[in-house]
Amino acid sequence: MIKEDNSKEFWETVYSAQDHYVYGKEPSKFLTEYVDLLKKGTALDLGMGEGRNAVYLASKGFTVTGIDHSPTAVLRAQKLAKDSGVTLECKESSLDFFLIPLMKYDTILVTDFHPSLTIMNNLVRGLTVGGTLMIEAYTKDQLKVRRDPPYVFECFEANEALRMAKGLKIIQYTEREIYGEHRVQLLGVKTSMA
Ligand SMILES: C[S@@+](CC[C@H](N)C(=O)[O-])C[C@H]1O[C@@H](n2cnc3c(N)ncnc32)[C@H](O)[C@@H]1O
């Protein structure tokens, strides 16, 4: 049994063990509900997985880059993009030491992925002015109900998403049981260069 951690080997085992889309092809409901409030333009999907959210954003006119270290997930994302008739830049790469380029993205998406400290500290800096950050993930409370999945390492501490969005104007924030699961949902906008 492979150790459960955020490693490439672990995620590759999760994806390659199944011949279907493990996280489905449908985008997150939070994303579909709030997509009109996201800043249109360049979008970055961190820990894109099999592409359900990246492809949805591309279908809405965003120029999307998705990054994930699992080759199987990236192949599925490319296939989903092709089947959906959209263009998606897929990067098969580790995010462990990834530095988000300064003020490059109009929207950054983090769904069911727990970023490294380096990324956390650079999320806001990576946004253009007016840019939007969307985070949706399990909280640690979910582990009391069910686990593996979600895995301990992908669950957010209380208020952790808020700390990642420091400096943004918060448009939507909730940390509670939603759709029968303990989730955090955050949408923030960068109102100035600071
Ligand atoms: C729970 S899945 C969520 C996928 C997608 N965001 C979604 O909502 O469907 C987490 C994803 O993050 C990726 N991931 C985790 N740690 C990573 C890292 N350090 N570098 C690149 N990808 C990573 C995994 O390969 C996996 O596809």
Image (tube, helix red, strand yellow):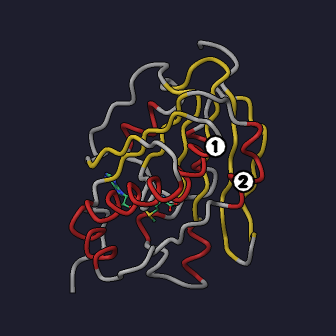
Taking the image as shown, residue 89 lies to the left or right of residue 13, namely: right
Seen in the picture, residue 40 relative to 94 is either above or below; the reply is above
Residue nearest the observer in this picture, 145 or 82: 82
Which residue appears at 61% of the width and 65% of the height? 26
Q: Would you name the residue on which mark 1 appears? A: 162
The earlier-in-sequence mark between 2 and 1 is 2
Dot 1 surroundings within 10 Å: few (below 14), some, or many (20 or more)?
A: some
Which residue appears at 31% of the width and 37% of the height? 98
Quadrant position of residue 168:
top right
Q: Of helix, strand and loop, which one carries label 2?
A: helix
The amino acid at mark 2 is Thr
**Measured Cα–Cα span from mark 2 to mark 1:** 21 Å
Please tell me in which quarter of the rendered image ligand 1 is found: bottom left
Q: Quadrant of the N terminus?
A: bottom left
Q: Would you name the residue on which mark 2 appears? A: 32
Q: Of helix, strand and loop, which one carries label 1?
A: helix
Seen in the picture, residue 106 relative to 70 is either above or below; the reply is above
Dot 2 surroundings within 10 Å: few (below 14), some, or many (20 or more)?
A: few
Residue that protrudes farthest toward the top in the picture: 193
Residue 86: x and y, percent? 51, 46
Q: Quadrant of the C terminus?
A: top right
Seen in the picture, residue 194 relative to 179 is either above or below; the reply is above
Residue 28: x and y, percent? 64, 60
Mark 2, ligand 1, within 8 Å: the answer is no
Residue nearest the observer in this picture, 72 or 125: 72
